[in-house]
Image (spheres, rainbow, N blue to C red):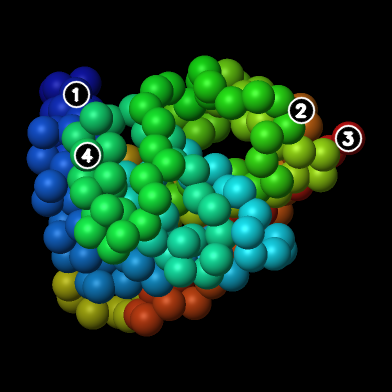
Amino acid sequence: MLRFWWRLVAFGFRLLYNELAFTSDYVSFVVSLGAWRCWQRAALRHLDVPPGTHILELAHGTGQLQLDLNARGYVPVGYDLSPYMGRIARTKLLRHHLPSRLARGRAQQLPFASASFPVVVSTFPTDFIFQPETLHEIYRVLQPEGLLLIVPNGALTGGSLTGAALEGLYRITGQRGGEGFDIHSYLLPFGFAAHLVYETCPRSVATVIIARKLP
């Protein structure tokens, strides 16, 4: 029964990232009680590079962070496996008269030259982001002392019944847990010095992993 449940959860997420991708922005808003964009933008608070810098976003989704990066004067490049997300993001960028620097493929095989980017960012990625093949590729495409920013999740803290119910939903779909996980010890063998920070958002808090490429 438990195996069936996790297969059902995986199928639901596959639909959300693909055939139902057009609902993603709305679903994200609802399940975060409107805090999703604040959670996503938490990564931007830790960018330490000047405008004009090329930034690689892994799993760009519907392109919301691409818009934010453009608005701050950066040169974002998006990469995502889902063709559905790619079409939505491209349409959104064109609607705002912005260049569409998007590519499609697996994060375990990045089609970029070594040391191409000073920053790689990923917000709410699935577990692919911590796979060894992905981390090796991120290390490869980052410039010396390059920055990896990951927003793995956000948590509702308002204490409302709705918030508690949504937190319960997060847990039963596998989006919670890992308390006490030592991110520094995990990422160090892949060449990163990492730590966690927590950014306050309305009725919630966003977790940000800040990892620096070691020589």
Left or right of 122: which side holds 30? left
Judging by the rendered image, the residue that carries numbered circle 3 is 215
Residue displayed at 40% across by 71% down = 38
Residue at screen point 15% across, 22% down: 4
Name which of mark 4 and mark 2 comes first in the sequence.
4
* Category of crowding for the residue at label 3, using alpha-carbon neighbours closer than 10 angstroms: few (below 14), some (14–19), many (at least 20): few
Marking on residue 37 = none
Mark 4: which amino acid? Arg
The one of 154 and 40 positioned closer to us in this rendering: 40
Neighbour tally class for label 2: few under 14, some 14-19, many 20 plus, Cα within 10 Å: few
Which amino acid, by three-letter code, is at mark 2?
Answer: Pro
38 lies above or below 171: below
The residue tagged 4 is 87
Q: Position of residue 150 (x, y in %)?
A: 54, 49
Residue located at (73% from left, 32% from top): 115
How far apart, in angstroms, are the residues tagged by discs 3 and 1?
Answer: 40 Å
Of 35 and 146, nearer the camera is: 146
* Cα separation between marks 4 and 1: 27 Å
Which of the marked residues, 3 or 2, is nearer the chain's N terminus? 2
Residue wearing tag 1: 7
Q: Where's the C terminus, which quadrant?
A: top right
Q: Are marks 4 and 2 in contact (CB under 8 Å)?
A: no
Tell me residue 87's x, y (percent): 22, 39
Instruction: Indicate the secondary structure of the residue bearing disc 4.
Output: helix
